Image: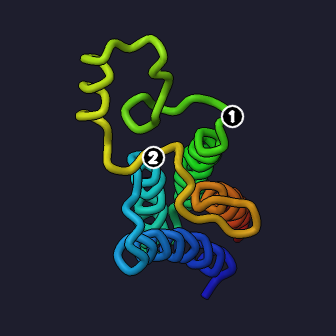
Amino acid sequence: MTKRTTYVVLAAGGSAALLLAAWSFQYFGGMAPCKMCIWQRYPHGVAIAVGLVAIALPNLRILPLFGAVAATITAGIGVYHAGVERGLWEGPSSCTSGDIGGLSSQELMEQIMSAPLVRCDDIPWEMLGLSMAGWNALISAGLVLVWIVAWRSS
C-alpha cells in the first residue's frame, strides 16, 4: 500500500468512524439528531465515497482534495452548530427556539405546532466541554489535514 493510499484510508476511515458514532448515538443511545446534525453527516458520506474512488483510481491525484473539501464543509457546519448550541449566534429558525417576545398568541401557537422535535440549540451530550457538533468540527479539521497530506504524498 502506498503512503497516499494509507492516508486516504485513514481520512475516509475517520469519516466512517464519525458517521458510525453519530448513528450509534441515534440508534443505540436514543438521541434523535436535529436538522444541523443531519447536515454534518452528508459531507462524511461524500468523503467516504471519495476515499473509495481514490483507492480504486490511485492515479487521479486530485481526488484527496475533494475529500479535504468534504471534511472542511462538515467541520464548518460543526463550528456553526456548536456556536448555535452555545448561543454565540442564532441558528436557522426552523430548528431553534428563537425570540418569541413579539409574537401574538396565535403566532406562538403556530410556531409551537411547526417546531421540530429536536432543537438545534440544545446540547444533548458533551464530553470535555465539547458537544457532538464541537467534536465533529475538531476531528473533521484533523481529517482535512490528513486529506491534504494524502494529496501531497507520492
How many numbered circles does the render carry?
2
Image quadrant where residue 133 sits: bottom right
Image quadrant where residue 123 sits: bottom right
The answer to whether residue 144 of the structure is visible from this angle is no
Q: Which residue is the site of mark 2?
A: 36
Where's residue 61, x and y in %? 58, 60
Amino acid type, mark 1: Leu
The answer to whether residue 90 of the structure is visible from this angle is yes
Q: Classify 10 Å Cα crowding around label 2: few (below 14), some (14-19), many (20 and above).
A: many
Q: Residue at x 30, y 17 (%)?
A: 105
**Is 61 placed above or below 104 here?**
below
**Is 95 placed above or below 27 here?**
above
Q: Earlier in the sequence, mark 1 or mark 2?
A: 2
Residue 43 shown left or right of residue 9 in the figure:
left
Q: Which mark is residue 88?
A: 1
Q: Indicate the secondary structure of the residue bearing disc 1.
A: loop
Do tag 1 and tag 2 residues touch (Cβ < 8 Å)?
no
Q: Nearer the viewer, mark 1 or mark 2?
A: 1
Where's residue 25, x and y in %? 45, 73
Residue 47 shown left or right of residue 32 in the figure:
right
Q: Residue at x 42, y 48 (%)?
A: 39
Amino acid type, mark 2: Met
Q: Residue at x 61, y 51 (%)?
A: 75
Out of 71 and 151, give the one closest to the viewer: 71
Out of 40 and 67, give the one closest to the viewer: 40
Residue situated furthest front in the rendering: 105
Q: Classify 10 Å Cα crowding around label 1: few (below 14), some (14-19), many (20 and above).
A: few
Of the 4 image quadrants, the one containing the N terminus is: bottom right
